Amino acid sequence: MIALVTFATGLLFGLGLAVSEMTNPSVVLDFLDIFGNWNPSLVFVMGGAVAIGMLGYVIRNRHTKPWLADKWYVPSRRDIDKNLVIGSAMFGIGWGLSGYCPGPGLTALTNNPAEAVYFVGALIAGAGLFHFQNYRKNS
Amino acid sequence: MDAYIYPLMGGLLIGFTTAAYLLLTGKVVGISGILAQALFSKERLLPVLFITGLIIGGSAYGVLIEPSVPLPELRNPMLLIISGLLVGYGTRMGSGCTSGHGVCGLSRLSPRSVVATVIFIATAILTVFLTK
C-alpha cells in the first residue's frame, strides 16, 4: 500500500508540475526575471500548493500518527546554520542559470532529453559529491 | 486571469498531493532528498517508485498540456552542467529544494524553510538579472 501511495504521489506531483508549467524552464526563467518580462504565474503555483499544504498540517495536528505509518517523519530542526544559507544560495544560483530545480530537471528526461542528460548528470554528481564528503564515514 | 488558471490548478494539485502523502505516510515531499535516497541509501524501492512516477507524470507536458512558450532548444551544455552541479550540491547542503522547503516547509511555517526559500528565490532572481 505504501508503495502504491508513493508511486501515485510521484505521478500526481509530476502532473502538477506539468499543469503549472514548472516543467518548462522558459516559464520559470520568466518568473525569475522580475526586472524584465516578468511572468507571475508561479506565484499562483506556490500559493495554491502552500494553501492546501497548510490545510494538510491543520489536519495532521489533530492526529497522533499517519494512516499508514507508525509515526510522523516531518523535519523538526529550527536552527539556521551555515549549510542552510550557503547551500540554498548555491541552489538559487544554479536554478537561475538554467530554470531547472530538481523536479523539473528530472521530468525533462522525457520532455527535453537533450538538455536533461547534461543537467541531471551534473545534478546527480553534485548531490553525490556532497553525500560522499559528509556521510561516507557514517554509512 | 485565464493565464493563471492552469498555474493555480497545478499548484492546488501539488498541494493536495503533498498533504495526502503527509497524512498517509507521515513524510514530506522533498524531491532533492528523495532523489538522494534513490541513489545513495540502502532502502531504494520507495524513492525509485516516487521518481519513476514523477517522470511519468511530468511527461504529460507537451502531450496533454500545451506549452504556453516553447521548451528551450539545447542551450550551452557547460551552462547546464554548472547549473546541475550547483543545484545538486546546494540542495543537499541546504537540506531541500523548491518542494521540500518551498512547498512543504512553508506549509508548516518552518523557520529553516522560510529562510531557505527567501535565499534561493532571491539568488535565482539575482542570477537571472546578471545573466540576461
Image (spheres, rainbow, N blue to C red):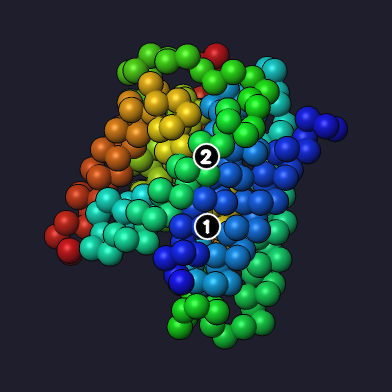
Name the secondary structure under disc 2: helix
Find the residue positioned furthest to the bottom: A64
Chain for numbered disc 2? B
Name the secondary structure under disc 1: helix
Three-letter amino acid code at disc 2?
Answer: Gly
Q: Viewer-proximal residue, A72 or A38?
A: A72
Chain for numbered disc 1? A
Find the residue positioned furthest to the right: B1
**Label 2, residues with CA under 10 Å away: few <14, some 14-19, many ≥20:** many
Can residue A62 be seen at all in this image of the molecule?
yes
Q: At which x and y percent is residue A107?
A: 46, 37
Q: Residue at x 17, y 63 (%)?
A: A139
> In the image, B82: left or right of B109?
left
Q: Viewer-proximal residue, B85 or B6?
A: B6
| Image mark count | 2
Residue bearing the label numbered 2 = B58
